[in-house]
Image: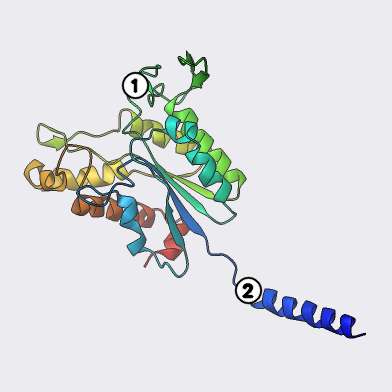
Amino acid sequence: MKALKITALGVMALMVTLAFKQPAKPVIYLIGDSTVRNSDKETWGWGSIIGQYFDLDKVGVNNQAMAGRSTRTFIKENRWHRVDSMLKKGDYVLMQFGHNEGSKPDTNKAGYRGVLKGTGEDTVSLTWPNGTKETVHTYGFYLRKFIREAKAKGATPIVLSMIPRNQFKDGKVLRADKDYGKWAREIAEQEKVAFINLNGITADKYDVWGADSVKKFFPSDHTHPNKMGATVNAQSVVEGIRANKSIQLNKYLK
């Protein structure tokens, strides 16, 4: 009888605990390259800034981006597998790639992270010196993989175009609207997910500010911004979210 009484009390305590247990809050996972996550010393990624614009009591931010990675190597190095293993229903995945995809894919050091251009089903087969075989796909193929696998977990994928580099021509910053930005938009439209034209939003600001002002954001090269530059890009991400009321992340913004 005593044992039964203890068991009943234990069950009751468990039921009370479960009744008051708060559901896990949604998490915003960030995947991308060094412009999303950097050393936060001389150069910064906007992923280190973005959290200050959200109510972190209601939503978490988990920056899984890694410097030097392309869509291809983010998968190849199992970084996407790690993110995918953590995803749950109600989470979000913000993806921004494009800076490291441009080399011709081959087995040399320069070609390790390159992808095929476009959004099609083209492939190239590589054989590495150790005999390992690898099939390389297009930029769009890899984005599509992220999107579909995030959806399968009940998460909401959002595609962002890459931030603009500090490169001007005839007084205007060069944009990615003919290649990686264009392809990112096309994949988002095909997969019916939200697209944030981060490249265009920040580029519009750069055009107004001019090359002399913009160069203060880039301490060492034309790709990696300092904290001020990363803050500009984080603000552009927020502007892109606010401009699209269908993006449910709006309810977590401050």
Which is more toward the observer, 182 or 38? 38
| Type of amino acid under label 2 | Lys
Instruction: Say whether residue 241 is left or right of residue 20.
Output: left
Disc sitting over residue 142 in the figure: none
Q: How is the image coloured?
A: rainbow
The residue drawn where x is 71% and y is 80% is: 16
Q: Position of residue 240 (x, y in %)?
A: 35, 51
Which is more toward the observer, 189 or 203? 203
Q: Judging from the image, what secondary structure is the residue with disc 1 in?
A: helix
The residue drawn where x is 64% and y is 78% is: 20
The residue drawn where x is 41% and y is 21% is: 116
Residue 168 vertical placement versus 24 (above, below): above
Which quadrant is home to the C terminus? Answer: bottom left
CA distance separating discs 2 and 1: 50 Å
Q: Position of residue 48 (x, y in %)?
A: 32, 55
Q: Position of residue 71 (x, y in %)?
A: 43, 33
Q: Residue furthest right?
A: 1
| Type of amino acid under label 1 | Lys
Mark 2 or mark 1, whichever is nearer to me: 1
Q: Which residue is mark 1?
A: 109
Disc sitting over residue 21 in the figure: 2
